[in-house]
């Protein structure tokens, strides 16, 4: 399992030009599920996202979590995180989990994140989404378990 977290001042997500989700200050998290991943990895990712200290404190140090700053998470499933372009120019997605299992783990991870006290807004699993985000920093963290 892997995620990319980006610190934002705001973000919004639409599907077919219809608004679906929006957040103010917080994190946009792109979440990928690898074949064979399970609930233990999803729970670990949720805990890491909730506790990730990427917001600045009063001294200008990245010392605060999304919970500490009262932020939100826009949580987006993204199987392309497991795209492999080592051979050729067209990525292979053989490492990505099959959709039904990936969706179940995506939803489970979102529930775990909410249980950590973080407000979560969702993408639409499997949809063609348009995401607008205003990055802060920029700060981008990649995590894999």
Image (spheres, grey):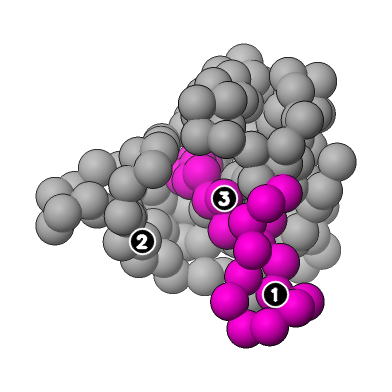
Please tell me which of labels 3 and 1 falls first in the chain: 3
The residue most toward the right is 145
Q: Position of residue 7 (x, y in %)?
A: 59, 60
- Mark nearer the viewer, 3 or 1: 1
Left or right: residue 119 versus residue 116 is: left
The magenta segment is 72-95
The answer to whether the residue labelled 3 contacts the one labelled 1, judged by CB atoms less than 8 Å apart, is no
Left or right: residue 19 versus residue 69 is: left
Residue bearing the label numbered 1:
85
Please tell me which of labels 1 and 2 falls first in the chain: 1
Q: Position of residue 104 (x, y in %)?
A: 54, 22
Marks 1 and 2, how far apart at CA: 24 Å
Residue bearing the label numbered 3:
79
Please tell me which of labels 3 and 2 falls first in the chain: 3
Q: Nearer the viewer, residue 46 or 34?
A: 34
Left or right: residue 100 versus residue 3 is: left
Q: Which mark is residue 131?
A: 2
User: Is residue 132 covered in magenta?
Assistant: no
Callout 1 secondary element: loop
């Amino acid at each position: 399992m892997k995620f990319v977290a980006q610190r934002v001042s705001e973000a919004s997500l639409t599907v077919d030009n219809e608004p679906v989700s929006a957040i103010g200050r917080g994190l946009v998290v792109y979440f990928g599920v690898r074949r064979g991943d399970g609930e233990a990895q999803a729970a670990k990712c949720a805990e890491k996202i909730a506790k990730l200290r990427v917001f600045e404190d009063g001294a200008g140090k990245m010392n605060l979590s999304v919970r500490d700053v009262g932020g939100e998470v826009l949580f987006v499933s993204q199987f392309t995180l497991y795209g492999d372009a080592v051979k050729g120019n067209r990525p292979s997605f053989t490492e990505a989990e099959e959709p039904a299992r990936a969706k179940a783990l995506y939803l489970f991870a979102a529930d775990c994140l909410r249980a950590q006290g973080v407000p979560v807004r969702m993408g639409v699993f499997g949809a063609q989404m348009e995401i607008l985000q205003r990055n802060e920093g920029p700060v981008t963290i990649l995590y894999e378990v």
